[in-house]
Amino acid sequence: MKYKTNNKHKSARIKSGKKNFKERRENKRDFAVNIPRELDFFESRIMNVLRRDRKRVFSSRELFRISGMDDKAEFYRALRSLESEGYIINDNHDIVLNELKKETEGELISLSKGFGFVRPNDGGEDIFIHGRDLKGAYIGDKVLVADIEKSKEGFNGRIVRVMEKARSVTTGVVSFENLYPELIPDNNLRYNPYIVDLGGAKDGDKVLCKLYRDYRDEWSECKVIKIFGEAECARVCADAIIEQYGIPSVFPKEVLEDAEKICENGITADDIKNRLDLRDKNIFTIDGADAKDLDDAISVEKTETGYILGVHIADVSHYVKGRSLVDEEAMIRGTSVYFADRVIPMLPECISNGVCSLNKDSDKLAFSCIMNFDNFGKMLSYDFKKTVINSKVRGVYSEVNEIFEGTASKEIIEKYGEVLTDLKIARSLADILKENTGSRGTMEIESDESRFVLDEKGVCIDIQPREIGEAQRLIEQFMISANIAAAKFSLQLGIPFLYRIHEQPEPQRVKELVTLLKALGIPCRELLKEKPATGDFALILERAKGTEAESLVSKQVLRTMEKARYSVEPKGHFGLALKDYSHFTSPIRRYPDTSIHRILSAYIEGETPENIVKRYSAFAEASAADSSAAEIRAMRAERDCEDVYMAEYLKNHIGEEFEGEVSSVTKNGCFVRLSNTAEGFLNVSLFKEHRFVFDGALTQRCLKTGRVLTIGTKLKIKVLSASVATGKADFAPAD
């Protein structure tokens, strides 16, 4: 197998030397836009106008009129305040939004021969760095960039200091295609460094390499420090992905010893003494058939006025104490990571699958959220209690779905006999809660997750869409309710907390979605307003439902959304249309949930809110930041792992034909997604009538026949090639 040299990046940018009015304004840009303070009403009105047309220069008179103010004194007071803090540039009453600062911190995200790009921490546009100004920085280094200027091609600057060094390593594939051995890197190193020491690696091996700078200060040489194995094996590539992302996969010996000590005594009489005893209640779990870390259970009762819902969560914080070895390791990991062939847990197995797992017919310590709802699904009250429970049934999603569908076997009915009535009540409450989410405008985006079927050797032999049934949605509604209650409880107490926030989508992404919707003929007038609400996106999804574009629109709406993250500030959850939201329900596999349990436990055990603020404020800040970073790392690694398993599946089907639909379009062709979720690239040059023209947005049109390839177009393809090492596949037209 030969691997192509990676040469994707743009040519070097040239600094602009214009001396005009715009440049004189840019010379005054000495402050950041994103200054962390809350703007007042008048300042916000001005900023809203400027952000709608970010590059336009407004006169002060025009800005006063458009902002809709009627108090000139307040207007000019707000204008002076914004200028003094660097939000705007005011050049003799010509006003423009200040989008650029002269100095910024960021991360070097890619390196090419002679240049690189830095991504600013504040989320601005990537900054081009000439090779002579890289200061020897490597991908992942935290750097300080100065002398930032803007040209027609974008932002330029120079690195003045490397603030934090990343590991100068990368995984990749050994290639003997040229006269000397090269590494085809997996990261954003846009050239192939020369391998000076193979360390026993062969052509086509997936390896980990240490990189070195040459006399020109370029990272052009490397040596192999670890050999994973044959690069065309997905399992081997998964090992390399774990290494590439720096995900800890082996628990240190001392951490395992600490975990064993935690688990050795089980539950004692002292543990139960001050807890609410719920062992006689009909409490049960519902999870996937292969789940081993059961961290949530439910109970539900019907009353004359409504429902009592109990969400009982494994009391991880009782076992994993702050600053213990297990806790420190859990904070480093941040989350469990789920690959096709393995799970990398956040906690050692004796805790996650043992003492904390809410296994059937076993006394377990829980942290319970007990909520009262009226008959219309309105949450009337909630309480958090330390409890002891005993799960009556180990429920499985597929079995509960069969019960709801009326297709369950006699054996399944007997298994759930003790909780059949409870399931009926739970279903009734979940339906009401689901209806309420619709009324507040929550988006229902269909999942496009994949389920990989592996043989006994770990090779991917099938891919199937992951199905979400009524039982999964029921549990989701109940967990959301408990998460809402946790957020409300913390705000009521005024204690430090971690909130799950999801912010308003960026206007540019909304514009791109609108362009697509118009091309598909789907009305989208609601998205044209300044700040579309969650319900506006829900309407778009509803209009696309049942059409050929349903899957595409659902995916594109998802891409339009900001990524959710953790914060100590309750900024709301746009996707769920909620003002306050948190994550309370998965402490076995998410560190922020563990953090929340620890803070709430302190209050329940008698600490005053004032003391909790002193004790946990810094901890909450650190946990929110670290957990968000760990989640992003896990998501990227999981996505890359899915790609290599998809490629492994497709490699075993080269030459075979499949039905698919276009999922995205580029200037050279289109990506085609098969019904089983596998995806590959189809170059338009492979069509017999290959004179296609790209419209620059979402359509390829053949000049000869008029044939159109656009998002949602159905077509039959043939698998042309697949590279497990890169996780990419190429298709050809089958007709």
Image (spheres, rainbow, N blue to C red):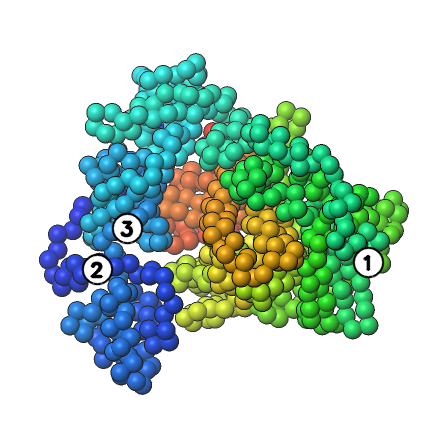
Give the mark nearer the N terminus: 2 vs 1: 2
Q: Quadrant of the N terminus?
A: top left
Residue 422 is tagged as: 1
Most extreme residue toward the bottom is 70
Q: Amino acid at mark 3?
A: Thr
**Horizontal side of residue 83 vs 328, given as left or right:** left
Give the mark nearer the N terminus: 3 vs 2: 2
Q: Residue at x 54, y 58 (%)?
A: 611
> In this view of the protein, can residue 405 be seen by the observer?
no
- Quickly name the residue at label 3: 104
Most extreme residue toward the top is 200
Residue 590 at x, y percent in the picture: 58, 46
Q: Residue at x 32, y 78 (%)?
A: 67
Category of crowding for the residue at label 3, using alpha-carbon neighbours closer than 10 angstroms: few (below 14), some (14–19), many (at least 20): many
Q: Secondary structure at mark 3?
A: strand
Category of crowding for the residue at label 1, using alpha-carbon neighbours closer than 10 angstroms: few (below 14), some (14–19), many (at least 20): many
Q: Nearer the viewer, residue 608 or 324?
A: 608
